[in-house]
Image (cartoon, helix red, strand yellow):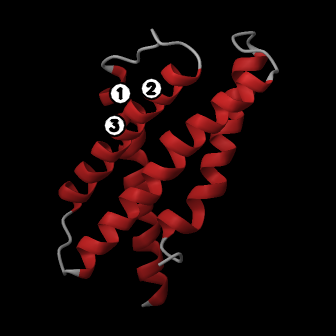
Amino acid sequence: MLRQPFFKYSFIALLIIDISYAMGLIMLGIADISLDTLFTTAIWFVSFFWLPVWSAAYIIIKIRSLNIENAVFEWLITVIIFTLGFYITEQLLRLSFNPSFALGNYKILGGLTWGTPIYFITRFIESKQKISQE
């Protein structure tokens, strides 16, 4: 199961994205170099990037093992799980730093913005692997 592209490439790629984003915030002066920034980066990585990707992949693989393969359904699962990841991230940040912190409707937009490309890039990688195997 770990050979599946969701699992194989996601950890390092998402870690690079998360660290790059944090570094960008630091360079722009929006965040400072501190333990709070490191902790926030870890929260975002685990609850918004890593766990949603792996959860979506796990569910999709289980559904495919039942001989059900529908791209729209799989994409919808991915978007919903990323939206839940945004919600969990918001709650963790509220508990850790600021009780009034709110992402509002950005949770749904974030789920669409991140879930869609990650799902379709993974489908592309899967199709390339199938072609190379044939």
For marks 3 and 2, give the CA distance: 11 Å
Residue 16 position within the rendered picture, expressed as x and y whole percent measured from the top left: 69, 45
Q: Earlier in the sequence, mark 2 or mark 1?
A: 2
Specify the amino acid type for callout 1: Lys
> For the point 78% across and 26% down, which residue is it?
35
Residue at image coords 64%, 28%: 40
Q: Position of residue 61 (x, y in %)?
A: 33, 72
Q: Amino acid at mark 3?
A: Thr
Q: Which mark is residue 83?
A: 3
Tell me: residue 123, above or below residue 111.
below
Task: Write the residue at 23% across / 49% down.
Answer: 76
Callout 3: 10 Å neighbours few (<14), some, many (20+)? many
Spatial CA distance of label 2 from label 1 is 9 Å
Q: In this figure, which residue is indicated by the disc labeled 1?
A: 107
Distance of mark 1 from mark 3, alpha carbons? 5 Å
Question: Which residue does the image show at 49% across and 40% down from the upper left?
Answer: 48
Which quarter of the rendering shows the C terminus? bottom left
Which residue carries the number 2 mark? 90
Label 3 vs label 2, nearer the camera: 2
Among the two numbered marks 3 and 2 on one chain, the one whose residue lies closer to the N terminus: 3
Q: Give percent across and percent down for residue 127.
A: 39, 72
Q: Is residue 114 above or below residue 22?
A: below
How many numbered circles are shown? 3
Mark 2 crowdedness (10 Å alpha carbons): few <14, some 14-19, many ≥20: many
Q: Is residue 72 above or below residue 99?
A: below
Which mark is first along the chain, 3 or 1? Answer: 3
- In the image, is residue 28 above or below residue 40? above
